Amino acid sequence: MAEGRTVIEQAACFAESSGIEVFLASDSFMSDVTAAGPALPDSKLADLKLADLKPAAAEMADLEVLRCRSDAEDHAGTFLRIGTDEFSFEMAALPPQGATGQGYVLYGVDAASLGKAEFSLMLRQPCQMFSHQGHDVPMCASATQVARLRVLAAGALRLSQLPGCIALCWPPSGAIMGAGYFKEVIGQWLNGGAFPALGLISIRADADGAMHSRGLTALAGQEVAALPGSAPSRAERAKLIMRIADHIVRTGPLDRPGNIEVAGIGTVALTLSANRSKVFLDVQAV
């Protein structure tokens, strides 16, 4: 465990962001909702006939909306069954200009396409709780974050196949992925491929040429950075960040400096910030 965040802080970080947002046009699976017309206030959209929601296409028969009722109103809820897994979700109407994508990195989608989205569905996996040092902590803490994200990504992968699905986003990454791009990279990851670093995290460049990941903190409590001069080119620095992010997702956060071998690149030196929340890479120091 990286010292930069405690188990509880890391769990809270993931729990607050443990949803994948799906941007949809009205021809996806909300025909019952959109039939109500524009007079419905956006804030009430999620309350409209959710129990009657049905996928528009027959091939989506494995999607089912379940209404859970309870005498206590705060225990009532609506769940989306995707195959054998159940997820909580919230829906909202988007403004007339659709999803702007402002402040996000776009992978496999452009702003014009995002502008056609009419609805947002936030897919969440309900958190169970466990006890840690006298505190109730979401089960999505520590080594389980990646496992939970895989379940969530598998559910979102099914939604990405809906007619009218335009894009998807895991908010901590600061990235929005087109539906086709999401299907490709998430499908590969779930089948044993590399972690989709350009999607479930993003890579940003500072004005001075330094590059760093965004979103890895929610999974491992660390981000990866490449300072100017740490690799011969900007493209190589980005590639290295992706490789080290995949290494951290597979093996856990780095707890001490060291060298690792990266296929096609060679030996990479890894150092840590004082609080171990950032991993710096350098191929020149080896």
Image (cartoon, helix red, strand yellow):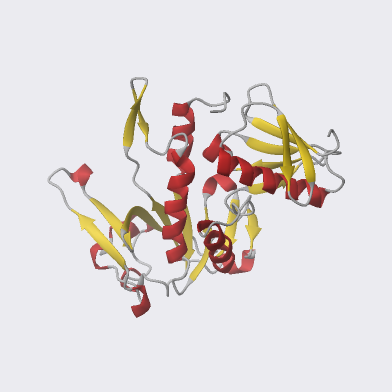
Please tell me which residue lies in front, 83 or 40: 83
Residue 85 appears left or right of 223: left
Residue 21 visible, this orientation? yes
Report the residue that reaches farthest toward the left: 71
Residue 121 appears left or right of 283: left
**Image position of 212 with respect to 189: above or below:** above
**Image position of 83 with respect to 19: above or below:** below
Mark count: 0
Residue 271 visible, this orientation? no
> Residue 226: image x %, image y %?
76, 39
> Residue 43: image x %, image y %?
36, 54
> Residue 243: image x %, image y %?
68, 47
Please tell me which residue lies in front, 185 or 251: 251
Residue 57 appears left or right of 206: left
Q: At 60% from the left edge and 48% from the top edge, which residue is drawn? A: 201
Q: At 28% from the left edge and 57% from the top edge, which residue is drawn? A: 47
Report the residue that reaches farthest toward the bottom: 58
Q: At 58% from the left edge and 34% from the top edge, which residue is drawn? A: 253
Displayed quadrant of residue 228: top right
> Residue 208: image x %, image y %?
83, 39
Residue 24 appears left or right of 260: left
Displayed quadrant of residue 286: top right
